[in-house]
């Protein structure tokens, strides 16, 4: 069975062709460079870029896979959450292909695709906990089984990836901010700045990152010249603070689920921020203390990509959830709490 998948929820335009034996015949991710000068994603620009590139990379993907569109068995695309313009471009394009080829179309929840990405290369036990860490979401899920997700906590303001982007912009560095901060932080002092830990005394599993960004904006405001040492120290302090918050929430999550008589043996980290090695190492160390296996998806399935969309489609097909051409794109689509 061949699956054609499209991802256009934000600023990556991606197409993937894969089969149900986990063989990826083609996987193209086009990261839109147009947003760098703005230090963040401009929705209208993103939509137009998707329109301009999607057909081109579809033709390229088919050529790389050495097949025609008529060889595809199932079509799928992200239908939410995300930027509505991008969602419409990707889903309408893919639905049209499905109609033309007289094949089924499967709408995919972007969040669910991230959560399922770790099952591509790991033997997953249920239940397990997943930390979803992206530019648009920061959430903790208890995954009981396929299509049974319990949201335990989420950010009340900025997503973790968004916080990285904003701090990078404050320091006059590039977009996306995650790689920029991770790289320059290697030369910095983790304890150079005492940054706040929002919701420090909260018993809930929710996050807040906007206060850290505000604290850094005040530090930057009072600094006349931002040299590389200053940027390194701020970046290192920020990255360390964020990691400490994640570690604390992980331990609180373990306590929470044990209080509900649930035992887990695995933690999956999914989303683009999961690629941050400093954060991963911090959480891995904590997992070892608790005899928990930590899992990551393949590297090319961490950030927004069509391979995870296609894989989610295959998993849902196994669960007999197929064909919905009339599914409405939803920028605020959620998974059940």
Image: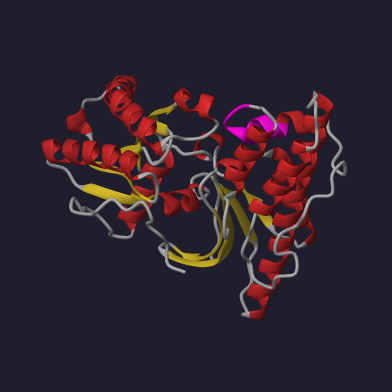
Pick whichever, 69 or 59, lies toward us. Answer: 59
Q: Does residue 276 belong to the magenta stretch? A: no
In the picture, measured across the screen, residue 79 lies left or right of residue 42, that is: left
Q: How is the image coloured?
A: secondary structure
Q: Residue at x 59, y 43 (%)?
A: 161
Above or below: residue 63 compared with residue 29: above
User: Residue 233's spot in the image, x, y percent?
Assistant: 82, 35
In the image, residue 100 above or below residue 201: above
How would you classify the magenta stretch by its main secondary structure? helix
Q: Any magenta on residue 178? A: yes
Foreground residue among 327 and 42: 42
Q: How many marks?
A: 0
- 217 left or right of 189 in image: left
Q: What range is drawn magenta here?
A: 174-182
Could you say which quadrant of the image residue 263 lies in? bottom right
Name which quarter of the figure residue 206 lies in.
Answer: bottom right
Relative horizontal placement of residue 76, taking residue 273 as reference (left or right)? left
Tell me the residue at 33%/45% (across/down): 84
Residue drawn where x is 68% and y is 46% of the image: 213
Coordinates of residue 123 in the picture (x, y in percent): 55, 53
Instruction: Residue 1: tell me if it is visible.
Output: no
Residue drawn at x 68%, y 53% as measured from the top left: 211
- Placement of the N terminus among the 4 image quadrants: top left
Tell me residue 169's x, y (percent): 63, 33
């Amino acid at each position: 069975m061949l699956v054609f998948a499209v991802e256009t929820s934000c600023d990556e335009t991606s197409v993937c062709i894969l089969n149900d034996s986990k063989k990826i015949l083609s996987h193209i991710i086009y990261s839109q460079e147009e947003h760098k000068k703005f230090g963040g994603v401009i929705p209208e620009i993103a939509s137009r870029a998707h329109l301009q590139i999607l057909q081109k990379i579809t033709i390229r993907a088919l050529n790389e896979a050495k097949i025609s569109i008529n060889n595809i068995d199932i079509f799928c695309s992200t239908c939410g959450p995300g930027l509505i313009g991008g969602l419409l471009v990707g889903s309408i394009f893919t639905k049209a292909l499905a109609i033309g080829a007289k094949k089924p179309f499967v709408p995919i929840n972007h969040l669910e695709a991230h959560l399922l990405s770790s099952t591509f290369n790991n033997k997953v036990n249920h239940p397990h906990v997943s930390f979803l860490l992206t530019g648009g979401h920061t959430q903790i899920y208890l995954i009981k089984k396929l299509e049974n997700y319990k949201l335990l906590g989420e950010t009340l303001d900025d997503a973790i990836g968004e916080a990285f982007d904003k701090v990078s912009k404050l320091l006059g560095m590039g977009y996306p901010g995650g790689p920029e901060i991770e790289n320059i932080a290697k030369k910095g002092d983790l304890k150079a700045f005492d940054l706040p830990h929002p919701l420090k005394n909260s018993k809930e599993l929710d996050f807040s990152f906007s206060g850290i960004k505000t604290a850094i904006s005040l530090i930057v405001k009072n600094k006349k010249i931002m040299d590389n040492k200053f940027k390194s120290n701020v970046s290192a302090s920020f990255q360390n603070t964020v990691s400490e918050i994640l570690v604390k929430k992980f331990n609180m999550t373990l306590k929470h689920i044990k209080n509900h008589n649930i035992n887990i043996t695995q933690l999956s980290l999914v989303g683009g921020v999961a690629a941050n090695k400093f954060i991963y190492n911090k959480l891995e160390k904590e997992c070892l203390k608790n005899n928990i296996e930590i899992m990551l998806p393949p590297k090319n399935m961490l950030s927004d990509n069509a391979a995870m969309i296609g894989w989610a489609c295959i998993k849902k097909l196994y669960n007999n959830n197929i064909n919905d051409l009339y599914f409405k794109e939803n920028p605020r689509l959620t998974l059940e709490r």
